[in-house]
Amino acid sequence: MVTEVDPRIYDTTAEITWCAGCGDFAILKAVKLALADLDIAPHEVLIVSGIGCGSKLPDYINANGYMTIHGRPLAVATGAKLANPDLHVLVVDGDGDGYGIGGNHFIHTCRRNPNITQIVENNQIYGLTKGQYSPTSDVGFITTTSPDGAIEAAFNPMAIALAAGATFVGRSFSGEPKHMAELIARGITHRGYALIDVLQPCVTFNRVNTYAWYRERIYHLEEEQGYDSSDRMAAWARAQEWGERIPVGVIYQAEGAPTYEDQVRALEGGSPAGRLLELAKMPATEQYETLKERFI
Amino acid sequence: MADAVINDMSILIGGDAGQGVESSGAGLCQSFARGGLQVFAMQDYRSRIRGGHNFYQIRLSERPMYSHSNPVHLILALTAETVPLHLDNVAAGGAVIFQEGLEVDEGGLKQRGVQCFAMPLVSIAEEHGSRIMTNTAALGAAAGVCEWPLPYMEGVIRENFQAKGPGVVESNLAVAQAAYDLARQHYATAFAYKLQPRNGPPRMLINGNEAISLGALAGGCRFISAYPMTPATSIIEWMAALPPELGVVTKHAEDEIAAVCMAIGASYAGARAMTATSGGGFSLMVEALGLAGMTEVPLVVVEAQRGGPSTGLPTRTEQADLLFVINASQGELPRLVLAPGTVEECFEAGWRAFNLAERYQCPVIVLTDQFLATSLRTLEKEAIDFSSVTIDRGELLSPEQLDSLENGYRRFAFSESGISPRAIPGHPKGVYAATSDEHDEYGHITEEIENRRRMMDKRMRKLGAAAREIRPPKRYGPDQADLTLVCWGSACGPSREAVDLINSDGGSANLIHFSDLWPFPAEETAGMLDACRRTVAVEQNYTSQLARLIRMSTGRSLDRTINNYDGRPFSPEDIVDELG
Amino acid sequence: MEYRELVAQVQKTAKLTSFEEAEAATLAVMRALSEVLSQEQARRVQACLPSELSSFLECCRPEPDPHIDSQTFIGWTLSGLDATGPRDKTLGGLDLFSVDVGEEAMRRCRCVFCALKACLDEALQEDFARELPETVCDWFRRA
């Protein structure tokens, strides 16, 4: 068991393809800091991503990674976690991947509460495909697929996560890597599904939601006197805040709720991956003979 | 009375959806199986909760059967509609049991030599229990006219109604007895078809889905994620009902895409994982199939076909996804397709699929259909041979092998076979990232030309290795024949019985049957076909997909195809009739 | 130095066509600096800068975020630069010039640093540089 982890162990020599100034750099750093802070070694973590600029993160970090298909990392991560609950499982994907095409899995993961941490790189735009609007783009946002301005009301991930029963709802800003690292570490430590929506500028394609734009609007819930993050109704109220004031920090945390894996009886005696290792040595098929009686 | 025909008949129970036809039929089958008879039972039901005709057709014999058979000899008509629907499918000398007073075309029946056994089923039910027990009365009457000893039915009645309390059990038993006595008294002598119990070791009554589940379990599968879809639903339900000590994690996912992705994630993390669906669900899974193939993650998908296209005939059968499944997903990736044709083959495919998936680190699709998934057959206990099951994880790196790794782990290392040694995440030296993008040996994204060529070669080369494990088609019947039927999957049951019918009638026929379909066993197939005189494909689809696959792979054209796309399985008699 | 003078200096060094562009670059760098400078350092620097710029450093905290790197730093400048081109008819979306614009952002930042350096004495310059993220401090030292 590794007792002290230096964040540099997560560094690779991979050529990073993000634009200069991209908020993903800070997110990558924060992930490394968080993992190291928790003394999690590269082989003990699995980072699952979807498709998008930020979803290339697993390619730029020395850890187990799985860059899957658009919108599906939560499902893949959930399966991996159930097969081997000992792995720390993180999901990293963008706002389109996580809230658009991945929306259905997002909602049900909130209900399901697996012990997985999801970091959504929310830049309110589609970067990899070069500039279309996203579910979190504000109304009126002009892009190549919204030439007259986005029509739909913006997706509110904080509110939807709360409504769907998520037990940890947090938000951070990529301009504050220290805050991000702390929040990510808290999310990983939280027993259950943790959503960390990271507001990050896309310096190339999003000329509206810039570093300055976010800086002018975000305020820290940690600095709010008397804010109780275990109060769901208070969290609901904060989750509605957008536009002029945007809260960051832990919006909601319910401690003590059992995780999905805690409640799967079939996991009590071992994991699917672990049991298979034993079965491969000794198929022990006699134990199934009694099942034949069910058909007689 | 004509000479008795012992233990060689078919019974059909017909009624409305919502009238308990399925459980009545299943219960009757159970009683016959326990009495030592061989059973083949086929269900015909609708995609609705209530209303509309459905039926259960039970064939009984002393020898194993692989198909239902027409005509039937006894109909239990729970509705008036049942009679005209099956009028043309009752043998002369057969009979129909129905509620007296029900509007039944007695004249039409008698014209066909079919007897009318009117019974006061409702009043028997009401007198001894309640109206809801009318089915029990019908079943009792059926046993009565066939003179099948009632105790076999009583055992089933006790089990089926146990949960509802002793009062309900006793009432049902009384209803069955009363109906049995009355039917036997009035009609037995007029009915030539008799059923007599036979001694012997108890047999299982099992369908294709159950057999696959048993095979998967024995093969080490401890994870199944699925979304309910007829006719595959019973697979996850059966697994979910297993004792938790067996450790099978089952997940009813929010949709099929989640189901297949969870299975992929579970497999990536080191479990043997599967999903089960039908054509529509598989359609949703197609992109993820590519993910598994590209990232070389083992995956088992059971695709139980049903009538398409689109929602189609949800509760009916078809074999029209063959070419779809072989080609599914964008680009080109290695996959294996197994198409078991019998319940025994389903059991074997259940565990064999996982060995193949882990050995070749690719998706393996087990392609069945509603007919095979749900039809019940009696099977000797020994036919499900758990000791024959092996668990072979292919080139899985042991912790010791990982310990001795130097210079970084290459998950996708080039090799002669195309198979790379595989590490399960969790070992300090086996850290790697997989990506659905094209990648190098380490799993890093790259579009470099030389690497792309080599990586495509590597992945597709695995099929060459796998081809050695693919079984050639099997021949059934004489080595030489005038006519050769060619089929795949569940069509083999009716086809082999058709061959038997033809041969026993003085004709000359045999059968070539495929149960492994991809990579296609081209060489062996070409050799076998070249030795045939006349070939006829038995296609449970419109566009003759097997014939097209054979032509594409071998250049050989079959002489003829017979196509059935009405959602009902071929019967042996249908095939013989079509051949003319 | 006076504010307009400083910005004009930036414009000249960076060879920008307009005062507004130079101003935007200067203010972006000030905002980025406000994220990385400690309150103590900020007070020392504020005294040397024109009030229009020193006001940006009001919000500096006693302990700034130690993990802000050169990418986040330059992001403030990049947010204000147009890196997109016309429609990309091959891949969809807009064509991008982020490589060139990235280089340009760094160049402009260095030019702003040059102008700021002129306001600080050598000792202060070194203390200042030490509080800048890795790589950014090199830009400053070499400006």
Image (spheres, helix red, strand yellow):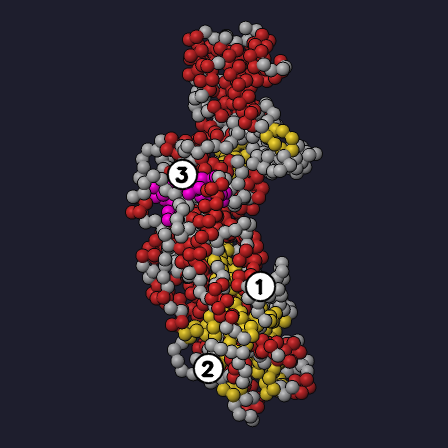
The amino acid sitting under disc 2 is Glu
Which residue is at a point 42% across and 65% down the rendered structure image? Answer: B348
Helix, strand or loop for disc 2: loop
Check if residue B465 falls in the magenta segment: no
Residue A59 placement: quadrant: top left
Which circle, 1 or 3, is nearer the viewer? 1
Mark 2 or mark 1: whose residue is earlier in sequence: 2
Up the image or down, B136 lies above or below B442; here it is: below
Q: Give the magenta range.
A: B421-446
Instruction: Determine which of the numbered discs, if any, sits on residue B62 in the image.
Output: 2
Which residue is at a point 56% across and 88% down the rendered structure image? Answer: B191
Up the image or down, B139 lies above or below B267; here it is: below
Are there few (<14), some (14-19), or many (20+) residues within 10 Å of tag 3? many
Check if residue B430 falls in the magenta segment: yes
Q: Gap between marks 1 and 3, in whole Å?
A: 47 Å
Question: Mark 1 sits on what residue?
Answer: B548
Q: Chain of mark 1?
A: B
